[in-house]
Image (spheres, rainbow, N blue to C red):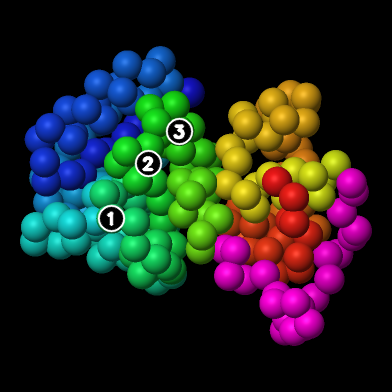
């Protein structure tokens, strides 16, 4: 199945680079490009692409507000939005996720991670640059001697293998990396993650990682 992609960035050079990386993938088709946020929102609403790849700093409408209009809590039929930016700022990450983005990457990310993030977004999963993930979520770990706020336990206990997957997710590893580290198939990793999401009532891997840091279960990568 082909993933239909919209690219939005005010720099022609960046759009060209992303088109070269993503457009050559056999399962990804770039169906539209936009140089500003308003055009991105208009084209996204008209074409309904599987993934919208948005920069943050764009004229007329920035990528964070465009994300809210396309994927925010008030949107009846939200689209999958992936933010790719030069700016590694916590405020941007929080706003992007709060506005409904299902991924946040830095522009210097590897081509392989960019492709994986687009595929993850198309499937409704969340992928954030590993360095950003660890920095943002590590502060959720309870300080020594200070219990964190109470939260409901999992509906079922997590298995040892599921906990191993959760630890790696919490440290920012991709599904492919998790499969390699645990010597299992990619489909097995996805099955474990689906089970973990169900048991934790988590919507995505970011919430899984946040749970891991809050509950101090990811002390080793």
Q: Tell me which label, 1 or 2, sits earlier in the chain.
A: 2
Mark in the foreground, 3 or 1: 1
Disc 3 versus disc 1: distance between alpha carbons? Answer: 17 Å
Q: Tell me which label, 3 or 1, sits earlier in the chain.
A: 1
Q: Tell me which label, 2 or 3, sits earlier in the chain.
A: 2
Q: Residue at x 19, y 61 (%)?
A: 62
Mark 1, residues whose alpha carbon is within 10 Å: few (<14), some, or many (≥20)? some
Q: What predominant SS class does the magenta segment belong to?
A: loop
Of the numbered discs in the image, which one, if any, rests on residue 150?
none
Mark in the foreground, 1 or 2: 1
**Residue 162 at x, y percent in the picture:** 82, 46
- Position of 96 with respect to 135 (left or right) is left
Q: Residues at badges 2 and 3 in contact (C-beta under 8 Å)?
A: no
Q: Residues at badges 3 and 1 in contact (C-beta under 8 Å)?
A: no
Tag 2 residue: 51
**Residue 193 at x, y percent in the picture:** 72, 45
Q: Which residues are magenta?
A: 137-160
**Residue 70 at x, y percent in the picture:** 32, 58
Query: Height in image: 205 above or below 108?
Result: below
Mark 2, residues whose alpha carbon is within 10 Å: few (<14), some, or many (≥20)? many
Q: Residues at badges 1 and 2 in contact (C-beta under 8 Å)?
A: no
On whether residue 14 falls in the magenta region, the answer is: no
Query: Height in image: 97 above or below 174?
Result: below
Mark 3, residues whose alpha carbon is within 10 Å: few (<14), some, or many (≥20)? some
Q: SS for tag 1? A: loop
Total residue callouts: 3
Q: Residue at x 72, y 30 (%)?
A: 181
Tag 1 residue: 87
Disc 2 versus disc 3: distance between alpha carbons? Answer: 15 Å
């Amino acid at each position: 199945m082909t993933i239909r992609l919209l690219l939005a960035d005010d720099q022609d050079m960046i759009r060209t680079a992303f088109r070269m990386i993503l457009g050559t993938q056999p399962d990804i088709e770039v169906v539209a490009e936009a140089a500003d946020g308003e055009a991105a929102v208009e084209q996204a609403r008209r074409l309904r692409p599987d993934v919208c790849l948005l920069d943050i700093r764009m004229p007329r409408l920035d990528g964070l507000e465009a994300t809210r209009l396309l994927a925010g809590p008030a949107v009846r039929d939200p689209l999958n939005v992936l933010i790719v930016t030069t700016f590694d700022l916590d405020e941007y990450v929080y706003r992007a996720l709060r506005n409904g983005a299902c991924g946040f990457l830095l522009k210097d990310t590897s081509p392989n991670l960019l492709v994986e993030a687009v595929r993850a977004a198309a499937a409704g999963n969340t992928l954030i640059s590993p360095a950003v993930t660890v920095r943002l979520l590590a502060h959720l770990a309870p300080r020594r001697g200070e219990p964190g706020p109470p939260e409901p336990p999992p509906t079922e206990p997590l298995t040892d293998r599921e906990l191993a997957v959760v630890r790696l997710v919490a440290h920012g590893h991709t599904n492919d990396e998790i499969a390699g580290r645990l010597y299992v198939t990619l489909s097995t990793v996805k099955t474990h993650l689906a089970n973990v999401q169900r048991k934790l009532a988590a919507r995505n891997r970011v919430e899984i990682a946040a749970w891991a840091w809050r509950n101090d279960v990811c002390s080793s990568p």
